[in-house]
Image (spheres, rainbow, N blue to C red):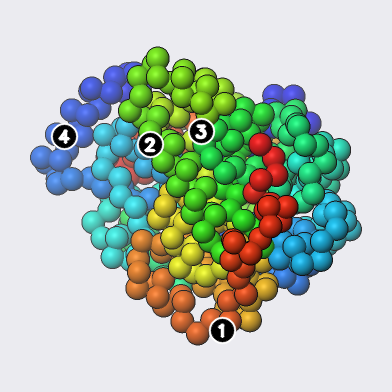
């Protein structure tokens, strides 16, 4: 390596996420699904063993995917390939970095490996995306080195209500910081349990210092457009595509609705004749232990 | 060149004067997917009117078009569906100035070494997508650019390079023997992302050398 080149800088890591804006990142469990996603216009795929809906129904400990399967997906597509590590499982992250995945998702969808600590993400050359339910959580993850944030939502439910709650909390929190003066910002940093310097940066710039995607329960083109209008830079779709009646059409339709999220006619056109959406879950039917968004802090 | 970076006031005056003489100068940024806002912000800082281009109609009256970074397969697919693939070709062949960064450089090429994908084919060049490898190999590097007095920091993200170029293409930047910046009659391409830096020299270069503003 030429020593005048610097790899793994924060600009290179967060810049990678800038290139994904306005796009859809799809969960896939094999090379065939990855090709369908790429063909539909996905900006990246997330390689995992089981989509969240199956993790929910089958139970057990959910872990990092088999390197063999990740390699097969990397071979199959030219778009970026992301993969998930368990919260706090920095060795899974080291393995994923060695496999040269393009982004690591330190994800609450997998069973946490550490209940008190998240991964020290700044120590890696590969960038990380992390979930957040509110502004304080987002800023804590950025403080640890996350180069991209996604609202958590409630994965594997096909129900967008939690994604909306988390996105409104993050975006509303950012708006609120904009009207506070300096003394109030320190108090707000205390309330948010977030690093003061980041709180101040957000107050001055009116946005997060990294790209903000949304995830967890997006199942229809209208869901995707809703999240974009609420302020998301892009969309993760998990179970919503490959647990639906017609994944090929639904994948392309969600891409179209994400591109043209401000144009109701285009969203209407994208929503036509897609067959059955995935069967959703009502939040009230989930026990506290089933709620994935509560994992991590 | 030397004075224009430091003095924003002077540049704004220049922009206003050209408004009076030839009507407003609008630069479009293709806004289907990718890092659109970063380009728009730099253009506005330079006192240029920047508009987001989502349909063929948005191309009319533009003094130049930037095709930003993003996923070239995604942008290519949406360009085909929206008619912008032909729209941008037509804009270009009537003399419209175009600048492609990263994914935009891939799309500007006439051929790719990899799988077939929609290309605009504005430049006589063979492109290697993700030529520098996966994200862990993405890097920053100070580059010597033809016509620039001081080095420019190139931010390369899963970046492409031109393996070869044909007649009419002037190479203005390289990493080793890989072509990462090139220029034609009314086109500029960069494999890296000037829009991710605070350095506006490449945007000024595009406006001055390619758009003639």
Question: Residue at the spot x=35%, y=69% of the render?
Answer: A264
> The disc numbered 1 marks a residue on which chain?
A
| Residue A291 higher or lower than B180, as above or below | below
In the rendered image, residue A157, in percent from the top left (x then y), is placed at 63, 64
**Do the dots labelled 1 and 2 sit on one chain?**
yes
Q: Which residue is mark 4?
A: B16
> The disc numbered 4 marks a residue on which chain?
B
Q: Is residue B163 left or right of residue B171?
A: right
Numbered mark located on residue A275 in the image: 1
- In contact (CB < 8 Å): disc 3 and disc 2: no
Tell me how far mark 4 sits from mark 2, CA to CA: 34 Å
Q: Which residue is mark 3?
A: A209
Question: Residue at the spot x=35%, y=24% of the render?
Answer: A180
Question: Residue at the spot x=77%, y=58% of the render?
Answer: A48
**Do the dots labelled 4 and 2 sit on one chain?**
no
- In contact (CB < 8 Å): disc 4 and disc 2: no
Tell me how far mark 1 sits from mark 2, CA to CA: 39 Å
> The disc numbered 2 marks a residue on which chain?
A
Q: Is residue B101 left or right of residue A108?
A: left
Residue B48, visible in the rendered structure:
yes
In the rendered image, residue A82, in percent from the top left (x then y), is placed at 71, 51
Instruction: Check disc 2: other Cα within 10 Å, few if <14, some if 14-19, many if 20+.
Output: some
**Do the dots labelled 3 and 2 sit on one chain?**
yes
Q: Is residue A139 left or right of residue A170?
A: right
């Amino acid at each position: 390596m030429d020593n005048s080149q610097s790899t793994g800088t924060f600009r290179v890591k967060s810049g990678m996420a800038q290139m994904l804006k306005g796009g859809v990142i799809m969960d896939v469990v094999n090379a065939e699904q990855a090709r369908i996603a790429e063909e539909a216009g996905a900006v990246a795929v997330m390689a995992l063993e089981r989509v969240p809906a199956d993790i929910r129904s089958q139970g057990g400990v959910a872990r990092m995917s088999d390197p063999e399967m990740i390699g097969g997906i990397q071979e199959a597509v030219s778009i970026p390939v992301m993969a998930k590590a368990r919260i706090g499982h920095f060795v899974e992250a080291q393995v994923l970095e060695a496999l040269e995945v393009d982004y690591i998702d330190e994800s609450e969808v997998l069973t946490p490996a550490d209940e008190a600590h998240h991964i020290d993400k700044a120590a890696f050359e590969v960038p990380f995306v992390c979930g957040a339910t509110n502004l304080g959580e987002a800023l804590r993850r950025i403080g640890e080195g996350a180069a991209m944030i996604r609202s958590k939502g409630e994965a594997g439910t096909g129900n967008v209500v939690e994604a909306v709650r988390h996105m409104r909390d993050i975006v509303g929190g950012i708006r609120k910081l904009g009207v506070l003066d300096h003394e109030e910002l320190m108090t707000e940093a205390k309330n948010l349990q977030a690093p003061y310097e980041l709180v101040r940066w957000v107050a001055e710039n009116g946005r997060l210092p990294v790209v903000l995607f949304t995830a967890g329960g997006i199942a229809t083109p209208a869901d995707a457009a809703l999240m974009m209008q609420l302020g998301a830079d892009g969309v993760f779709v998990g179970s919503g595509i490959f647990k639906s009646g017609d994944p090929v059409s639904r994948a392309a339709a969600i891409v179209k609705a994400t591109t043209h999220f401000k144009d109701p006619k285009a969203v209407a056109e994208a929503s036509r004749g897609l067959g059955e959406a995935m069967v959703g879950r009502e939040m009230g039917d989930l026990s506290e232990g089933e709620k994935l968004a509560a994992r991590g802090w | 060149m030397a004075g224009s970076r430091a003095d924003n006031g002077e540049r704004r005056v220049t922009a206003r004067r050209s408004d009076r003489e030839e009507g407003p100068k609008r630069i479009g940024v293709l806004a289907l997917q990718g890092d659109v806002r970063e380009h728009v912000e730099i253009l506005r800082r330079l006192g240029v009117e920047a508009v987001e281009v989502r349909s063929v109609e948005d191309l009319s009256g533009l003094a130049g078009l930037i095709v930003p970074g993003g996923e070239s397969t995604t942008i290519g697919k949406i360009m085909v569906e929206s008619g912008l693939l032909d729209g941008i070709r037509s804009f270009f062949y009537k003399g419209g100035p175009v600048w492609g960064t990263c994914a935009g450089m891939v799309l500007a090429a006439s051929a790719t070494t990899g799988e077939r994908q929609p290309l605009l084919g504005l430049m006589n060049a063979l492109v290697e997508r993700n030529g520098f490898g996966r994200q862990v190999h993405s890097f920053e590097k100070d580059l010597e650019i033809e016509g620039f007095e001081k080095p420019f920091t190139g931010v390369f993200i899963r970046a492409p390079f031109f393996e070869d170029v044909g007649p009419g293409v002037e190479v203005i930047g390289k990493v080793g023997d890989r072509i990462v910046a090139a220029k034609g009659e009314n086109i500029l391409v960069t494999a890296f992302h000037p829009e991710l830096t605070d350095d506006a020299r490449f945007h000024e270069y595009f406006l001055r050398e390619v758009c003639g503003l």
